[in-house]
């Protein structure tokens, strides 16, 4: 048994040497250092990962890297198994809702072949290429996505029969376009199991066309796509400047739309901003509904993070959740990445998950974590809270709302920074130290006598501590 234990450690160490040369150091430390080898048996290497969330992320982003490393060590017959265990090594146990499970991945699995069919076949059974994790019940609704989500639900109930054809979903990277598009496909299959649904990226679509041209099978290719009831095309912007691909897609689009079949398209920009695209295609993208996904607000980000925690059975302290959501603002994928990294770092280093550990993890994702609170940061947050321009805090105006915001800013600057009274006064339009002293005393008196002021100061202090941004 001792020999087997040494062997599985040796094999995994060699795999890590290969992996280290294929990815950057940050990804290696985050996603592979926490993995532990467990067993090697019959060319099957078992490795342990902290949780299912971690496993799914590694599988989605690094499966080819793993295949290459395991194949190099164990040959073509090599296989990799994941052992997923609840966290039990950290000082505080973050329980999972699932028992220990094992997930197996065959390294020698062949790539899915291009979906060509023999002419004359009218209905076929195909793999929809959907990720079953992407569903409506774990896609949190907020003001940032309400229109697109509701349109998607309407389509799922009655594909091809709504005014939302095509549905053109656009937004920046990491805001949930792919999740929503695939959720539509999964919901269609659940409610209409007889429908043929296909999800395809633009890159894969283009590669299929190239193969079709090489094999003189373009007609078969077009025939296949015209049989799809719900076609989901991800990242259509990559169709730019690909004349032949655009031409073929144009004919497929027209035929599907004419037949009443549903088309869902995602993009990182609205149709009008697509460059290198034929006007006739752009005009068709505008036929249905163009729905944008914007950056989720703070409350929606918290709801999204808590939903991801529920799915994994992970419990985080409230101040940690708020700290993450104050700092990760523009990318939902980064919320997921921080959560996974946090759990991994806690398990690996046997540390409690607290704000200090969270700050260390987040610094790997963004560059605007400040080492100290600044007066400018305080002014910005207070001005935003009272909905007044920051410049007004520097002015001589005596408008009541501005005076209150200015005095509170001075009080918080005195309490939360190391600046002198004179230095603080200088940042408020060149006021002298006596003005700062008066403002600090005025706010202290109000805190002692006025509940609203007391609660406002608490809320502002919390925002300032959580933001830690310049």
Image (tube, rainbow, N blue to C red):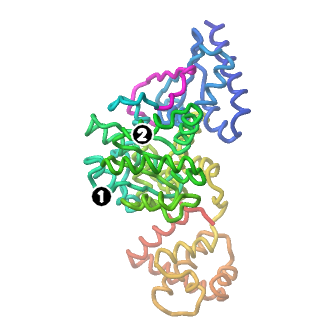
Q: Is residue 38 left or right of residue 92?
A: right
The reply to whether residue 329 is in sight is no
> Is residue 121 depicted above or below 141 in this figure?
above
Task: Name which residue lies at 42% across and 56% down.
Answer: 168
Residue 265 located within the stretch drawn in magenta: no
The label shown at residue 163 is 1
* Residue 427 location (% of width, % of height): 66, 81
The reply to whether residue 82 is in sight is yes
Task: Name which residue lies at 69% across and 82% down.
Answer: 422
Residue 96 located within the stretch drawn in magenta: yes
Q: Which residue is mark 2?
A: 225
Q: Is residue 176 left or right of residue 72?
A: left
Q: Which one is in front, 307 or 407?
A: 307
Prevalent SS, magenta region: loop
Q: Is residue 268 left or right of residue 169?
A: right
CA neighbours of label 2 inside 10 A, class few (<14), some (14 to 19), many (20+): many
> Is residue 71 depicted above or below 177 in this figure?
above
Q: Rounded to the nearest whole Å, what is the CA distance between mark 2 and mark 1?
A: 22 Å
Q: Quadrant of the C terminus?
A: bottom right
Q: Which one is in front, 100 or 146?
A: 146
* Residue 338 location (% of width, % of height): 55, 46
* Residue 117 location (% of width, % of height): 43, 29
* Displayed quadrant of residue 131: top left
- Mark in front: 2 vs 1: 2
Q: Which one is in front, 116 or 456?
A: 116
- Which contiguous range is marked in magenta? 94-115
Q: Which structural element holds mark 2?
A: helix
Q: Which structural element holds mark 1?
A: loop
């Amino acid at each position: 048994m001792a020999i087997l234990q040494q062997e599985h450690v040796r094999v995994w160490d060699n795999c890590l040497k290969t992996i280290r040369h294929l990815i950057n150091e940050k990804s290696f430390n985050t996603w592979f250092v926490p993995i532990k080898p467990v067993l090697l048996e019959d060319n099957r290497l078992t490795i342990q990962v902290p949780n299912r969330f971690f496993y799914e992320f590694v599988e989605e982003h690094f499966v080819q890297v793993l295949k290459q490393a395991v194949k190099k060590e164990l040959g073509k017959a090599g296989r990799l198994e994941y052992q997923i265990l609840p966290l039990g090594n950290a000082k505080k146990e973050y329980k999972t809702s699932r028992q220990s499970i094992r997930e197996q991945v065959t390294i020698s699995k062949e790539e899915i072949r291009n979906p060509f069919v023999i002419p004359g076949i009218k209905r076929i059974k195909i793999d929809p290429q959907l990720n079953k994790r992407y569903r409506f019940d774990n896609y949190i609704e907020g003001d940032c996505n309400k229109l697109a989500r509701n349109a998607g639900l309407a389509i799922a109930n009655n594909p091809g029969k709504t005014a939302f054809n095509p549905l053109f979903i656009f937004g920046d990277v990491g805001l949930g376009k792919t999740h929503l598009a695939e959720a539509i496909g999964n919901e269609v299959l659940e409610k209409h199991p007889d429908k043929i649904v296909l999800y395809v990226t633009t890159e894969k679509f283009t590669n299929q066309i190239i193969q079709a041209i090489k094999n003189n099978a373009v007609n078969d290719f077009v025939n296949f796509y015209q049989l799809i009831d719900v076609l989901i095309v991800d990242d259509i912007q990559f169709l730019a400047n690909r004349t032949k691909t655009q031409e073929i897609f144009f004919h497929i689009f027209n035929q599907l739309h004419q037949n009443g079949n549903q088309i869902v398209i995602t993009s990182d920009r609205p149709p009008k901003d697509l460059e290198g695209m034929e006007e006739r295609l752009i005009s068709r993208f505008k036929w249905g509904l163009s729905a944008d996904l914007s950056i989720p607000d703070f409350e929606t980000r918290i709801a999204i993070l808590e939903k991801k925690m529920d799915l994994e059975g992970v419990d985080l302290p409230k101040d940690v959740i708020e700290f993450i959501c104050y700092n990760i603002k523009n990318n939902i994928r980064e919320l997921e990445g921080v959560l996974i990294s946090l759990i991994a770092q806690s398990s690996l280093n046997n540390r409690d998950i607290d704000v200090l550990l969270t700050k260390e993890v987040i610094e790997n994702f963004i560059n605007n974590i400040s080492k100290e609170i600044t007066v400018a940061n305080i002014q910005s947050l207070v001005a935003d809270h009272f909905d007044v321009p920051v410049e007004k805090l520097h002015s001589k105006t005596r408008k009541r709302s501005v005076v209150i915001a200015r005095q509170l800013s001075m009080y918080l600057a005195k309490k939360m920074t190391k600046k002198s009274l004179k230095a603080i006064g200088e940042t408020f339009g060149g006021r002298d130290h006596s003005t700062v002293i008066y403002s600090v005393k005025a706010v202290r008196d109000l805190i002692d006598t006025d509940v609203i002021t007391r609660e406002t100061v608490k809320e502002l202090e919390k925002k300032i501590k959580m933001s830690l941004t310049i």
